[in-house]
Amino acid sequence: MNADLRYTFAMRTLHWLIFLLALFAVSAIEVHDLFPKGSLARTILFEIHQSAGLSVFALMVLRLLARLVTNIPPPVPGPRLLQRIAGLTHGILYLLMFAMPVLGVLAVAWAGEPIEAIGMTLPLFLGKNDGLALLAKDIHESGATLVYIFVGLHAAAALWHQFVMKDGVLRRML
Ligand code: HEM
Ligand code: HEM
């Protein structure tokens, strides 16, 4: 494949790092449900969730900057409608990866709890508000469903290209 048609090293590295961290965040919070409230394991898994989620946010900032300053390959050749759907899905994924950490932080801060992440306790910066905490948590949890749907569709499309169409699209990101 023509090297010009691959994403840059920075974009490829950030894509897969963010994928792994998001997977880590989701796995930690799903497993945390198996432990009783107040248990050490549940607390540690929630801390891992917050740390991985905040790392996603930090790397998304770098990724957005990398996207703005590096060359992005042109859309995969094909019907214009499919190119639009792929572009829209990528936009939604950007939005979700920024919005999920922000909503998570708001949910914790409005609940009047400190953010426990990356071995640090981040100070509270918002007043306690149970109504807003619940709202942020509800939107965060609905957002999680959207993450599953859009990452699922996106990964299925990548695998369809790789194994059915065999057109090398996955290699643009490897
Ligand atoms: C990419 C980033 C993130 C993703 C994909 C994500 C995903 C999720 C998922 C899948 C759940 C479980 C939803 C459910 O059980 O219905 C959840 C719950 C939650 N997340 Fe996140 N999250 C992210 C970042 C964060 C961050 C940075 C924080 C806070 C600093 C946070 C705080 C929370 C809270 C408070 C809950 C509810 C936990 C509970 O009470 O059961 N999340 N998140
Ligand atoms: C948290 C999970 C994921 C997110 C948020 C995500 C997000 C994105 C975004 C936004 C792009 C467009 C390039 C850019 O502007 O950055 C992209 C491209 C790509 N992703 Fe993902 N992705 C995820 C997981 C995956 C997985 C699991 C696969 C493979 C199974 C995959 C394969 C690809 C490929 C092949 C491209 C290049 C598509 C093209 O050139 O049009 N991604 N991804």
Image (cartoon, helix red, strand yellow):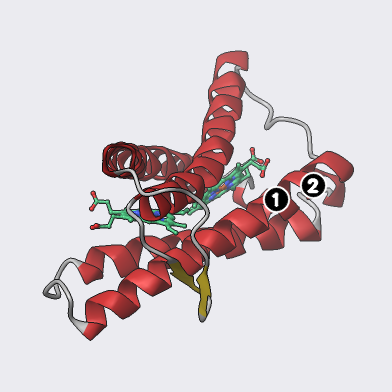
Which residue was labeled with disc 2? 65
Q: Residues within 10 Å of mark 2 (few under 14, many from 20)?
A: few
Amino acid type, residue under disc 1 in the picture: Val
Count the marks: how many? 2
Q: Residue furthest left?
A: 36
Q: Position of residue 76 (x, y in %)?
A: 67, 32
Which image quadrant is residue 30 in? bottom left
Amino acid type, residue under disc 2 in the picture: Leu
Residues marked 1 and 2 touching at CB (< 8 Å):
yes
Q: Position of residue 26 (x, y in %)?
A: 35, 60
- Tell me which residue sits at (84%, 52%) in the image: 3
- Tell me which residue sits at (11%, 74%) in the image: 36
Q: Residues within 10 Å of mark 1 (few under 14, many from 20)?
A: few
Q: Please state which of residues 5 and 14 is positioned toward the viewer in this rendering.
A: 14
Work out whether residue 1 can be spotted: no
Q: Horizontal placement of 45 versus 2: left or right?
A: left
Q: Position of residue 34 (x, y in %)?
A: 14, 71
Depicted 35 relative to depicted 77: above or below: below
What SS does tag 2 mark? helix
Depicted 118 relative to depicted 171: above or below: below
Q: Position of residue 77 (x, y in %)?
A: 69, 27
- Tell me which residue sits at (27%, 44%) in the image: 130
Q: Tag on residue 61?
A: 1
Answer yes or no: disc 1 within 8 Å of ligand 1. Answer: no
What SS does tag 1 mark? helix
- Tell me which residue sits at (39%, 43%) in the image: 147
Depicted 152 relative to depicted 8: above or below: above
Q: Residue furthest bottom?
A: 40
Which image quadrant is residue 132 in? top left
